[in-house]
Amino acid sequence: MKCGIVVFPGSNCDHDCYHILKHILQLDTHWIWHKDEALNSFDFIVLPGGFSYGDYLRPGAIARFSPIMKSVIAYANQGGRVLGICNGFQILVESGLLPGVLMDNAGQRFICKDLTLRVENNDTPFTALCEPGTVLKIPINHGQGRYFTDDDTLKRLQDNGQIVFRYCDTEGNTSDEANPNGSLDHIAGVVNATKNVMGMMPHPERCADPLWPNVDGQMIFKSLIESSLAHS
Amino acid sequence: MLAKIHVTLKNGVLDSQGKAVHHALNDLGYSEVQDVHLGKYMEIALKGISEKEAQTRVKEMCEKLLANTVIESYRFTLEPAE
């Protein structure tokens, strides 16, 4: 199984993703430089977290026009699986591969902490191994993670099962207290209509190495691997 | 030519920075402050195009990159370079 991690100037979770995919999950893992124009045949690719182009203008706004993004968009439109984590999610919404935007956290503060999310839809390549309603403990680390979209789009996301994760308490209940950044409808992650592109603000790569007691993040990568095997 | 561009959040989109500044101004005793909106201001120097072309191209720049039209609106003026 072959996967790629796109490296933008300012990506800083790229090595964490690489470590998990290559050393923990033993995949044939490749770097993809943002200036490359062609994408080789990958089973899936990851847009990692960080601060691409210093988050100048808006997070993801400039990375979205990197040479590689043309190929990433074409790859996604052909059904290729793309996982965007944190800044990767921001790049996916800026590029139009996912609906909505990620705005400044409601509390105006950068938040870095462990929290819990509920799996809302396990009928996606990214969550196939989770039971619906599973509560995963995965950290967030962002200043701009407040998901927002217009009412029509929100309705469409709800109706089509495109909301994959919602912030919740440890019991799995959503509430304003359990929502760290003021995200609309407690949204922590969404997929596109064809369910091959997912963006999430929490960082699964930060809790996927068994050296650390929490490996909930593995569920997402293992789901991706499993569904890629089934697909090929 | 100089394009002066303002990008602000659309009405109805929570402007959390504006809100924070609003509270701070009220706390400083400026009780007349009713609402604060924060945005971005950009100056873009242009060369070798007519004003008519600039109108079209600056609009395009705003739509493509400078504003995220899901949440932001923009307005701009074109002035002769100083």
Image (tube, grey):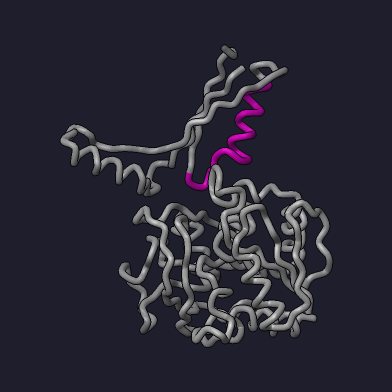
Residue B1 occupies which quadrant of the picture?
Answer: top right
Q: Nearer the viewer, residue A193 or B66?
A: B66
B62 is within the stretch colored magenta: yes
**Quarter occupied by the C terminus of chain A:** bottom right
Q: Which of A48 and B51 is in front in this view?
A: A48
Percent position (x, y) of residue A124? 62, 77
Say which residue appears at 49% left-offset and 55% top-offset: A102
One can see residue B12 in this view? yes
Principal secondary structure, stretch drawn in magenta? helix
The span shown in magenta is B53-71
A142 versus B17 height, above or below? below
Percent position (x, y) of residue A70? 75, 52
Q: How many marks?
A: 0
Residue B37 occupies which quadrant of the picture?
Answer: top left
One can see residue A192 in this view? no
Say which residue appears at 52% left-offset and 68% top-offset: A189
Say which residue appears at 36% left-offset and 45% top-offset: B17
A145 versus A206 height, above or below? above
Image position of B48 (left or right of B77): right
Q: Which of A200 and A16 is in front in this view?
A: A16
A207 is within the stretch colored magenta: no
Say which residue appears at 41% left-offset and 65% top-offset: A185
Image position of A41 (left or right of A27): right
**Quarter occupied by the N terminus of chain A:** bottom right
A113 versus A131 height, above or below? above
Percent position (x, y) of residue A146? 44, 58
Residue B34 occupies which quadrant of the picture?
Answer: top left
